[in-house]
Amino acid sequence: MSESFDDLIAQAQQKFAQAPDLATLENEKAKFLGKKGAVTELMKGLAQLEPEQKRQRGQQINQVKKQIEECLNQRRHEFAQAELNQRLAAETIDVSLPGRGRGMGGIHPVMQSWQRIEEIFRSIGFAVADGPEIETDWFNFTALNNPLNHPARSMQDTFYTEMQDDDQLPLLLRTHTSPMQVRYAQQHTPPIKVIAPGRTYRVDSDATHSPMFHQVEGLWVAKDISFADLKGVYSLFLKAFFETDDLQIRFRPSFFPFTEPSAEIDMMFSTGPNKGRWLEISGSGQVHPTVIRNFGLDPEEYIGFAFGSGIERLTMLRYGVNDLRQFYEGDLRFLQQFNR
Ligand code: DAH
């Protein structure tokens, strides 16, 4: 190959090597290999030559072109490699770093109690029912022998909606699960054994009252049961719930419009920090004849026993929590203690 050819190659190599970036390199390429580039010009010169010379010089020019292309591709490759290295450096992943970790969720303590209550009552043949939290005045009060203007209503102030029911009375947030006694009994034939756990509402807020809380209603309607059956079932429930037989239970006379006689259920702890103390757990009683009639049943034929217990209350006693509001503050330090 002639010297001028070698020069051309050396020149291209130098220009390519000096190009600081890909755009400049492509510009330089045009000067050698483009339409008006040096190699193209050489090709044009072939036209005047004799066939044999044309063949020889043509081969040489092709060689030159090939070498310049090689230089170009090598430089292109260098740029691609540099860019890749830069990206690799910028996007490094340190695989030795610890994972971010995903906290495991847990079941809220009140929900744990709810689940336990359902399990225990199912195991002794009770059905589990669910009902509306927005209730009519009739189901929440009147059907439970608690008519309009009855003073006992004032014990259960609640939240009223702007919607009205068929009696033109505002729909309200149920103050207890007791309306489920009527709803369930109207739709089932005795013997009835059911619990109805759920949310309830009252205008109350302090260490032992939350505006929203949970109750579990229990109802047993049959022809041949007595207060002893209620006491037996409820005692069994408490022993299972608190996981000890070492409990004493008493039924203390009380008043509810929907039961006669009525009792509050107290429990005495025989061990632990509450040893010797009676603690109120639940309302209960023999279903009032008026309520039995509202079930659509004859009170001369059927007898019913019922109870309504606060689920937060049971949870507080089980775990020794002394402020019910802690259940609803969402403080993980508190909640995590129930999910270990
Ligand atoms: N519903 C009552 C309350 O919230 C509790 C209650 C008392 C429920 C006696 C009953 C019952 O089923 O028989 O205070």
Image (spheres, rainbow, N blue to C red):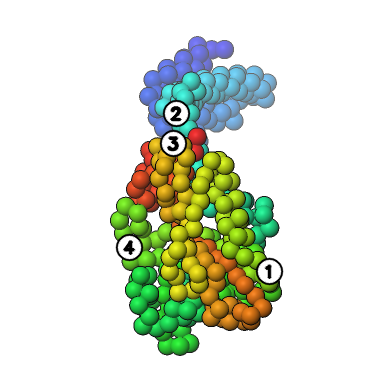
Q: Residues within 10 Å of mark 4 (few under 14, many from 20)?
A: some
Say what secondary structure mark 3 lies in: loop
Which one is earlier in the sequence, the residue at label 2 or at label 4? Answer: 2
Judging by the rendered image, the residue that carries numbered circle 3 is 272
Per the model, the C-alpha gap separating discs 3 and 4 is 30 Å
Nearer to us of marks 3 and 2 is 3
Nearer to us of marks 3 and 4 is 3
Per the model, the C-alpha gap separating discs 3 and 2 is 59 Å
**Amino acid, disc 4:** Asp
**Amino acid, disc 3:** Gly
- In percent of width and height, residue 20 lies at 37, 24
Judging by the rendered image, the residue that carries numbered circle 4 is 204
> Which one is in front, 78 or 113?
113
Which one is earlier in the sequence, the residue at label 3 or at label 1? Answer: 1
> Which one is in front, 136 or 36?
136
Give me the disc on residue 224: 1
Judging by the rendered image, the residue that carries numbered circle 2 is 91
Which one is earlier in the sequence, the residue at label 3 or at label 2? Answer: 2
**Res 130 visible:** no
Q: Residues within 10 Å of mark 1 (few under 14, many from 20)?
A: few
**Amino acid, disc 2:** Glu
Whether ligand 1 has any atom under 8 Å from the Cβ at mark 4 is answered as no
Per the model, the C-alpha gap separating discs 2 and 4 is 57 Å
- Vertical side of 274 occupied by 211: above or below: below
**Rendered residue at 55%/72% (across/down):** 287
**Rendered residue at 52%/20% (across/down):** 74
